[in-house]
C-alpha cells in the first residue's frame, strides 16, 4: 500500500452491490488515499446515497478523463462491461473487473489486448468473492505444477443445497428463500444451472494450468433437478450434494474440466462448506493439499477483493499467466468418471456407452443407478438428461463400491 501514489484517482463503473462495497472500503481504509473521480451508472431515476454530481450516465466521461489512474468495472451488463474493459485496455489503462461472465467469454482477446497495448486487467473478485484464489494460483503457484483445483464457486447453489439439507426444504422453497435473502437472482439460471461456476472455472484454468478455455468446452450440470431424495441418498454414504467445479490433470498431462453436482464425503473439506460460503481445494505436486474458504459474494467481501486488485495494480502488479509459457497440458474430456443417477419413473436413460450401469434402488417415483461414463459422453447426453429431469452427481470409485455394498440386499442389477 505504501507504494500507491497518494494522488491516484479511480473511475468506478456500477454502484450496485459490488460498486458500493468498493466505495465503502475506499472510504473506510484511511490509507487508501484514492480519490473517486466519478461513478458511472445506468438508471437516472434511481435514488442514490451520494450527491448527484458524483454520477455520470455516460461511460466516456470516465474513459476519456486523462486524470483517472485506474478503473473498476463493476456493472451487471456483460456486453457493456466488455465494451468498457476493451476500450480501457486499448488505451493502455489499468482496469479491475468483477464480471466473470464477460471475462470468461473473452479471456484470450483480453489477454492479447493487455499484451499489445501494455494495459493491466485484474479480476480477483470475479472468482470466489473474497477468496484470494486467482492471485494464489497466478503468483504463489506460478512455478509449481498443480494436479487439481476444485471448489464450490457459487454461493447461491450452495445456500440452496445447505437449506434443503439442514431444514428439509424442497428445492423450490430453498430457491425462494435464497431469492428473498438476495443470494439468488430473480432469474437464477446462471447460478443453479452451473453457468456461473463454469465461467469461474475458465478463469481458474487460465492461471492454474495455462489454458484458455471457452465456457462451452466445460461439461456442465446444475442443481436445478436435485430433490430431497438425492440428499437422503447421499446421507446413506456419509456424503452431501455439492456443486463442484473441478480442473484435474492426469499423469499424461491431460486436463479434465467439469462442473457437476458431486456427492462429497464428510472426509473432504468441501463437505463442510455451507450456505453462501465458497471453498477451493488446491493440489500442488509438492506442497500438499491446501484449502481456502470464505465469503463468495456480498458487498463488502467482493469490495475487499476489488480493493486488493486496485491497490496491487497501483503498485505495478499485473498477471503474467506464467503457466501458459510451459504449455505441456492439453484438454482431454475422455476421462471416465463414476456417477450417480436418479431417473424419474416415467423417464428412461438414453443410449450411451454406459459402463458398470447398476440399478441400485427403485421406488415408485424413481430408479437410482450408478455408472461410469466418459466426460465427453456425458456432454453429449446432457440436454437429454436435463430435459427428462434426470439428476446426476459425480461420485468416486470408492463411493460406487460403497453404494453397491449398501444396496446389495436390493439385488443390484448390472445392465452392462
Ligand atoms: N454481488 C456479488 O456478490 C458479486 C460477487 C462477485 C462478482 N459480482 C459481479 O460484479 C458485477 C456487479 O454485480 P452487482 O451484484 O454489484 O450488480 P448490481 O447490484 O445489480 O449493480 C449493477 C450496477 O451496474 C450498473 N449498470 C448496469 N448496466 C449498466 C450500464 N449499461 N452502464 C452503466 N452502469 C450499468 C447498475 O446501474 P444502476 O445503479 O443505474 O442500476 C448498477 O449500479 C457483476 O458482473 C457480477 O457478476 C458480483
Image: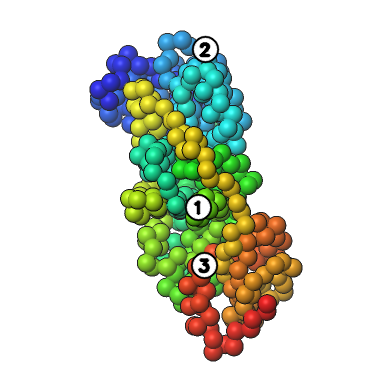
Asked whether, in this view, residue 296 is left or right of residue 381, the answer is left
Q: Position of residue 192 (x, y in %)?
A: 56, 53
Task: In the rendered view, tell whether residue 191 sits above or below residue 405.
Answer: above
Q: Position of residue 394 (x, y in %)?
A: 54, 64
Query: What's the residue at 63%, 65% (across, down)?
Result: 373
Within 10 Å of the Cα at label 2, are there few (<14), some (14-19), or many (20+) other Cα atoms?
few
Is disc 1's CB within 8 Å of ligand 1?
A: no
Instruction: Tell me the element at label 3.
Output: strand
- Check disc 1 and report the residue beneath it: 249
Question: Which of the image's four quarters has the C terminus?
Answer: bottom right
Q: CA distance from mark 2 to mark 3?
A: 52 Å
- Check disc 2 and report the residue beneath it: 64
Query: What's the residue at 72%, 72% (across, down)?
Result: 348
Counting labels gives 3
Question: Which of the image's four quarters has the N terminus?
Answer: top left
Marks 2 and 3 close (CB-CB < 8 Å): no
Instruction: Tell me the element at label 1.
Output: strand
Query: What's the residue at 39%, 63% (across, down)?
Result: 268
Viewer-side residue, 381 vs 367:
381
- Check disc 3 and report the residue beneath it: 395
**Quick check: can you spot residue 153?**
yes
Viewer-side residue, 289 vs 129:
289
Residue farthest right in this picture = 351
Q: CA distance from mark 3 to mark 1?
A: 18 Å
Is disc 2's CB within 8 Å of ligand 1?
A: no
**Quick check: can you spot residue 22?**
no
Q: Please name which of the two marks, 1 or 2, marks the residue nearer to the observer.
A: 1
Q: CA distance from mark 1 to mark 2?
A: 44 Å
Q: Upstream in the sequence, badge 3 or badge 1? A: 1
Asked whether, in this view, residue 283 is left or right of residue 363, the answer is left
Query: What's the residue at 35%, 16% (across, down)?
Result: 8
Amino acid at each position: 500500500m505504501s507504494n500507491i501514489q497518494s494522488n491516484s484517482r479511480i473511475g468506478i463503473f456500477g454502484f450496485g452491490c459490488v460498486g458500493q462495497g468498493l466505495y465503502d472500503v475506499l472510504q473506510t481504509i484511511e490509507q487508501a488515499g484514492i480519490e473517486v473521480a466519478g461513478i458511472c451508472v445506468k438508471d437516472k431515476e434511481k435514488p442514490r446515497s451520494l450527491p448527484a454530481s458524483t454520477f455520470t450516465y455516460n461511460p466516456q466521461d470516465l474513459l476519456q478523463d486523462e486524470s483517472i489512474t485506474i478503473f473498476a468495472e463493476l456493472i451487471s451488463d456483460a456486453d457493456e462491461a466488455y465494451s468498457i474493459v476493451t476500450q480501457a485496455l486499448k488505451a493502455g489503462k489499468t482496469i479491475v473487473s468483477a464480471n466473470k461472465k464477460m471475462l470468461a467469454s473473452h479471456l484470450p482477446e483480453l489477454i492479447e489486448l493487455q499484451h499489445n497495448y501494455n494495459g493491466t486487467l485484474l479480476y480477483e473478485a470475479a472468482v470466489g468473492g473474497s477468496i484470494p484464489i486467482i492471485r494464489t494460483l497466478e503468483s504463489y503457484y506460478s512455478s509449481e505444477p498443480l494436479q487439481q483445483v476444485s471448489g464450490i464457486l457459487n454461493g447461491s447453489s450452495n445456500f440452496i443445497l445447505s437449506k434443503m439439507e439442514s431444514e428439509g426444504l424442497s428445492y423450490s422453497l430453498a430457491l425462494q428463500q435464497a431469492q428473498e435473502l438476495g443470494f439468488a437472482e430473480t432469474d437464477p439460471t446462471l447460478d443453479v444451472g452451473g453457468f456461473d461456476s463454469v465461467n469461474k472455472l475458465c478463469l481458474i484454468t487460465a492461471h492454474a494450468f495455462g489454458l484458455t478455455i471457452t465456457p462451452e468446452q466445460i461439461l456442465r450440470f446444475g442443481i436445478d433437478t436435485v430433490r430431497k431424495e438425492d440428499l437422503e441418498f447421499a446421507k446413506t454414504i456419509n456424503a452431501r450434494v455439492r456443486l463442484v467445479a473441478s480442473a484435474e490433470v492426469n499423469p499424461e498431462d491431460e486436463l479434465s474440466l467439469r462442473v457437476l453436482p458431486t456427492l462429497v464425503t464428510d472426509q473432504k473439506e468441501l463437505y463442510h462448506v455451507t450456505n453462501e460460503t465458497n471453498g477451493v481445494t488446491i493440489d500442488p505436486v509438492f506442497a500438499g493439499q491446501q484449502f481456502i474458504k470464505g465469503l463468495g459474494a456480498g458487498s463488502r467481501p467482493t469490495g475487499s477483493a476489488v480493493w486488493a486488485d486496485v491497490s496491487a495494480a497501483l503498485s505495478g502488479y499485473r498477471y503474467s499467466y506464467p503457466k501458459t509459457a510451459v504449455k505441456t497440458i492439453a484438454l482431454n474430456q475422455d476421462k471416465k468418471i463414476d456417477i450417480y443417477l436418479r431417473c424419474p419413473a416415467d423417464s428412461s436413460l438414453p443410449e450411451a456407452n454406459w459402463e458398470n450401469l447398476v440399478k441400485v434402488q427403485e421406488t415408485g417415483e424413481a430408479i437410482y443407478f450408478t455408472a461410469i461414463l466418459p466426460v465427453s459422453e456425458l456432454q453429449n447426453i446432457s440436454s437429454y438428461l436435463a430435459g427428462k429431469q434426470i439428476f446426476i452427481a459425480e461420485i468416486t470409485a470408492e463411493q460406487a463400491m460403497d453404494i453397491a455394498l449398501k444396496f446389495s440386499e436390493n439385488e443390484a442389477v448390472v445392465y452392462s
